[in-house]
Image: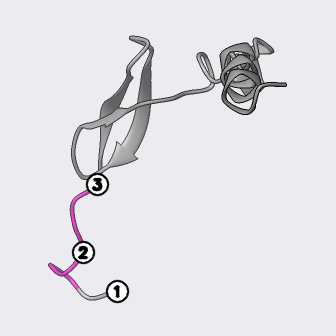
Amino acid sequence: MKALIHPNYKIVTAICSCSAKFKVSTTKKIYIDVCSQCHSFYTGKNKKANIGGRIERFNKKFKY
């Protein structure tokens, strides 16, 4: 590898929106929106959209 052309990697703290902190190797501090502690795939908690209102509006609009 050539000298002085690659960025300096260091261990920094990645901070999630749920306040979880992780140590990662990167060039600068990063903020993430979703991590394994708050993502629904990993936690098993699924968020379902409320579609009842849409169906009611459709039926009201087309008089079903």
* Image quarter in which the C terminus is found: top right
Residue shown at the point (23%, 38%) measured from the top left: 29
Contact, mark 1 vs mark 2 (Cβ under 8 Å): yes
- Mark in the foreground, 1 or 2: 2
Tell me how far mark 2 sits from mark 3, CA to CA: 9 Å
Extreme-left residue of the structure: 4
Whether residue 36 appears in magenta in the rendering, the answer is no
Secondary structure under badge 1? loop
SS for dot 3: loop
Q: Which residue is identified by label 1? A: 1
Q: Position of residue 38 (x, y in %)?
A: 59, 17
Q: Could you tell me the amino acid type at mark 3?
A: Tyr
Range of residues picked out in magenta: 3-9
Q: Residue 6 carries which label?
A: 2
Q: Which of 50 and 19 is in front in this view?
A: 50
Q: Which residue ends up furthest to the right in the rendered image?
A: 64
Which residue, given by chain and number where applicable, does mark 3 sit on? Answer: 9
Provide the secondary structure element on which disc 2 rests: loop
